[in-house]
Image (cartoon, grey):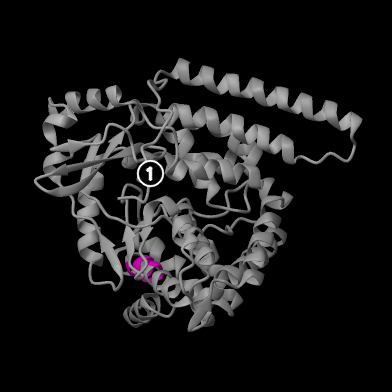
Amino acid sequence: MADEKNPTKNSQDKIPTSKVQRATEFMKTGVKIGGNYIKHYAQKVVNPDLDRSHLDEANAQDIYNTLSQLKGSALKVAQMMSMDKNILPKAYTEQFSMAQHSAPPLSYPLIVKTFQSHFKKSPSELFDTFSREAVNAASIGQVHQASKDGKKLAVKIQYPGVADSISSDLKMVRPFAVQLLGLSEKDLDTYMGEVEQMLVSETDYELELRRSIEMSEACKHLPNVRFATYYPEYTCKKVLTMEWLDGWHLDKFLATNPSQEIRNRIGQALWDFYDYQMHNLLAVHADPHPGNFLMREDGTLCILDFGCVKVIPPHYYKEHFKVIDPIIFENDEKLAEVFTALQFVYTDDTPTDRQFFLHLFKEMLSITLQPFQQPVFDFGNEAYFKHLFEFGEKLSKMEELRKSKKTRGSKDALYINRTYFGLYTLLNDLKAQVNTQTTWKKKFAESQQKA
């Protein structure tokens, strides 16, 4: 299931599960961050040229240490933010990216307790072999290696209290999100409900089992893509068992210095996988961070973890992808209709606001849609990604967006956009050259014929 062969050290013997315990840990972190600011400004008196890098590093370390001990929703939000290289300072993205597959794991006695609670047996009674220490640990659960009847297995165990603390955790990270992401309370109200709903689904491993089997079966025909076999008899709401897949996570794969041909092959597999789900299944693996993929030297891509799946409402799908059509994109009247349906603009906007946001979001799409406009797109084009990140930074600081009395963008766009941004980032890291004219063009043509 992973490329980590050494047991994970510094295991965690308990997780704060009550609201009071978790709130106390957040408060302690707030005090530490306050101390970091005091120290920074005291040093700045002596050295006026001192930049924020040391302050960011100290704050990122303190926040990550707390979130990694609490695990669950708070750590998941940090992991999500680490995927966007533009949202946070580098110190934060480096720390938070550890949540993808390197969080401190739970100790073995807590794992045994989970198995006894759900299977009435310990792991050693259920499997022929079971690693006492985790080989991977992330935000919602950790993975152990096991075997049964000669089959090598990966067993994912959910952390205690994760499902019960989602709502309260998200309330506690709200101030953090407002400060670091520049979001208004209004935007948070719109999007946090979507995040909470998705996180609740991620904590139901029986739902993940069904989705894993269904989506793996639906996508098995795609070239150079490999899925695990799943084992319902060793799965429950808090434990998920699947075939162990060997391969490298992205950073270690890139360290092998793969050829451009192999990079392109894996990049194409990634694109085809997401393209097919988005347009054929209207349901998509919406957690495209490096910890959820394994890569092999022959160019095979292994897909892990169908816990976070965004089901796309058909009416929203129809509007969301209309903007790819150049005929619509270049027709301001038709584009305004689509933007209204997507809640970028509203019918009761003032004429000034309407023109401002129409122009702003058309500029945004002119950048983000570039990969769809060429037969082969080079995701290694750093000039493109520099432009993309700079525009993202411009949006994050735009007063018109922050002070708008309306949320700009449907909640259904949140995970779809996150999926594409994560995909773009992975392909950029691979420096892959990808044929992007695959499923979407055919499906769009079909939808136009039906219309």
Q: Which residue is drawn at 54% across and 66% down?
A: 428
Residue 195 in the image, given as x and y percentages of width and height: 44, 42
- Tell me if 303 is positioned left or right of 432 in this view: left
Using the image as rendered, state which of residue 177 and residue 436 is in the foreground.
436
Quadrant for residue 183, please give it: top right
Using the image as rendered, state which of residue 45 and residue 394 is in the foreground.
45
Quadrant for residue 439, please give it: bottom left
Quadrant for residue 232, please give it: top left
**Amino acid under disc 1:** Met
| Rendered position, 327 above or below 392 | below
Q: In which quarter of the image is the C terminus?
A: bottom left
Q: Confirm whether the magenta stretch covers residue 181.
A: no
Q: Is residue 329 visible?
A: yes
Residue 328 in the image, given as x and y percentages of width and height: 52, 78
Q: How many marks?
A: 1
Tell me which segment is drawn in magenta: 270-276
Q: Is residue 190 visible?
A: no
Q: Main secondary structure of the magenta part?
A: helix
- Tell me if 307 is positioned left or right of 220 in this view: right
Identify the residue position indicated by label 1 in the image.
198
Residue 250 in the image, given as x and y percentages of width and height: 45, 58
Using the image as rendered, state which of residue 390 and residue 403 is in the foreground.
390
- Tell me if 324 is positioned left or right of 308 in this view: right
Q: Which residue is drawn at 60% across and 53% down?
A: 85
Classify mark 1: residues with Cα within 10 Å, few (<14), some (14-19) or many (20+).
some
The local secondary structure at tag 1 comes to helix
